[in-house]
């Protein structure tokens, strides 16, 4: 209550005084105005107004017009309309224009105080909702997807391009790469950001229950359906539905999902009532859906309906340059949340992490940092703090840094790095007889990434140059 400000606008001095005293005793900050002009001047001040009690008919104007002006400046301000000319038409007009309540004079002070408390509670709830939305938007801004590598930069660029659209998005990538984080970034930077983001893991729910989870059911639809249940599609109305692990969905349910995507309507299990679906769908999977289609495990028509905008999240081993950034980001997170004081990582320990294949991707790295934060607590992370499996991981043998000579005229850094990358790729290709699949495995790269690099660099087997 402390700090909440109420504006009273009424030309009856006695009523203004009575309301002022009653509200002042309750601890509110109260300002009064005798007419529309005075109220307009007050409303232009920087201090927020949480509630306005406004007479419907003022000497110099209309109370509903004043309400609109106040609300345009003070977005979360609630308004209670006071009037000596009570009618159903006036009450309807006031509430349609945005009034919290409409009350006729003369009224009991206790009655108005109850209304004031309700209006203040509603105003506070509105503020909290806005703060929550702001926090969610900040949490899922693009810069919260950590990384500077070319691979993750392409993902961020794609998110920015598709966020404003209504198109279905298919996010692919290995487990632990952050597919849900990408889905949330799309949602919270879209026009649907203030509406629900509803996730469901299609692989975690038994097939016979998933239909009910998605579309809801009515009482008695099946054994155990003791009450009506709202499904995720309905919960996500006007917002975004995130279908994680879509590749695990049964063929029968795939047909029903396809129909919803095509016709924008569905029926709860056991019901004949059709519900319109205003939902943006983002799906995700860690399996190769194209291969699943070829094997007859996933419907081709549903695949193309989902794959309108594909976004592939690179594995962590494909963006090793981001590992130091991610490691320090998680250190800061766990220092704050667990009250720890880790200061960084030694070059030797970082070298081990850079050489590791990260089968669990970012989730595995986050779990590792959390473990170190709990067990170590403070100081620099060194080799002794890393679990044995990371130390056993085979590492690339790099040239001895002490033998690298930089000529007096300097060296082109980018050219040197590019040349070293070419050497690594060529050695892997030579070792595997130019089998790109095997070379990609040796380099712990995605095959398509390796193929792109080979094309971009113009690398060819020796016999091709004859």
Image (spheres, grey):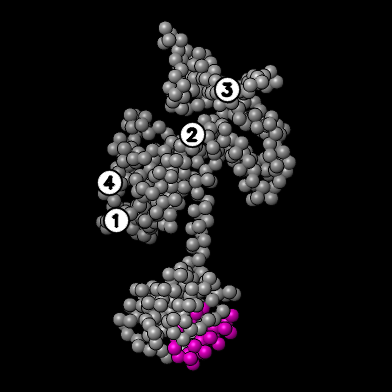
Q: Earlier in the sequence, mark 3 or mark 2?
A: 2
Q: Tell me the CA gap for discs 1 and 3.
A: 59 Å
Question: Under tag 3, what secondary structure?
Answer: helix
Asked whether residue 11 is drawn in magenta, I would say: yes
Q: Tell me the CA gap for discs 3 and 4.
A: 52 Å
Asked whether residue 172 is drawn in magenta, I would say: no
- Image x and y of residue 317, in percent: 54, 30
Q: Which residue is mark 2?
A: 151
Q: Earlier in the sequence, mark 2 or mark 1?
A: 2
Residue beneath the point at 46% across and 37% down: 154
- Image x and y of residue 85, in percent: 35, 88
Q: Nearer the viewer, mark 1 or mark 3?
A: 3
Above or below for 223 versus 360: below
* Residue 216 lies in quadrant: bottom left
Horizontal relation, residue 254 to residue 349: left or right: left
Q: Tell me the CA gap for discs 2 and 1.
A: 38 Å
- Image x and y of residue 117, in percent: 51, 77
């Amino acid at each position: 209550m402390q700090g909440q400000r109420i504006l009273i606008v009424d030309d009856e001095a006695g009523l203004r005084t009575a309301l002022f005293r009653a509200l002042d005793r309750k601890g509110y900050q109260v300002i009064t105005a005798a007419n529309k002009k005075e109220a307009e001047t007050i409303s232009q001040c920087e201090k927020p107004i949480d509630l306005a009690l406004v007479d419907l008919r003022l000497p110099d104007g209309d109370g509903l017009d004043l309400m609109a002006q106040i609300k345009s400046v003070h977005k979360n301000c609630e308004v209670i309309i006071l009037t000596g000319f009570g009618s159903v038409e006036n009450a309807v007009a006031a509430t349609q224009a945005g009034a919290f309540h409409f009350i006729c004079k003369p009224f009991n002070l206790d009655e108005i105080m109850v209304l004031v408390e309700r209006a203040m509670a509603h105003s506070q709830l509105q503020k909290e909702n806005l703060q929550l939305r702001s926090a969610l938007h900040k949490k899922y801004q693009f810069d919260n997807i950590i990384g500077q590598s070319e691979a993750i930069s392409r993902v961020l660029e794609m998110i920015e391009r598709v966020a404003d659209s209504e198109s279905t998005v298919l996010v692919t990538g290995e487990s632990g790469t952050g597919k849900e984080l990408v889905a949330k970034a799309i949602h919270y930077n879209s026009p649907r950001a203030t509406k629900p983001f509803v996730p469901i893991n299609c692989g975690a729910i038994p097939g016979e229950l998933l239909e009910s989870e998605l579309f809801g059911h009515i009482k008695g639809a099946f054994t155990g359906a003791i009450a009506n249940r709202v499904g995720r599609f309905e919960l996500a109305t006007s917002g975004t539905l995130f279908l994680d692990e879509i590749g695990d969905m049964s063929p029968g349910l795939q047909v029903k999902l396809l129909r919803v995507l095509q016709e924008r309507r569905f029926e709860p299990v056991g019901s004949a009532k059709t519900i319109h679906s205003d939902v943006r769908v983002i799906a995700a999977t860690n399996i190769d859906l194209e291969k699943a289609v070829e094997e007859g495990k996933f419907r081709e028509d549903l695949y193309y309906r989902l794959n309108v905008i594909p976004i592939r999240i690179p594995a962590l081993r494909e963006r090793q340059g981001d590992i130091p950034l991610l490691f320090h980001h998680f250190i800061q997170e766990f220092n704050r949340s667990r009250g720890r004081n880790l200061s960084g990582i030694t070059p030797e320990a970082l070298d081990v992490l850079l050489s590791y294949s990260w089968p669990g991707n970012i989730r595995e790295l986050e779990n590792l940092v959390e473990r170190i934060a709990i067990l170590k607590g403070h100081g620099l992370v060194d080799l002794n703090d890393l679990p044995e499996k990371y130390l056993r991981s085979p590492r690339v043998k790099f040239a001895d840094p002490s033998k690298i000579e930089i000529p007096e005229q300097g060296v082109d850094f980018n050219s040197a790095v590019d040349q070293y990358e070419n050497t690594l790729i060529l050695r892997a290709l030579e070792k595997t007889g130019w089998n790109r699949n095997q070379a990609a495995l040796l380099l712990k790269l995605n095959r398509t990434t390796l193929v792109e690099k080979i094309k971009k660099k113009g690398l060819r087997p020796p016999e091709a140059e004859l």
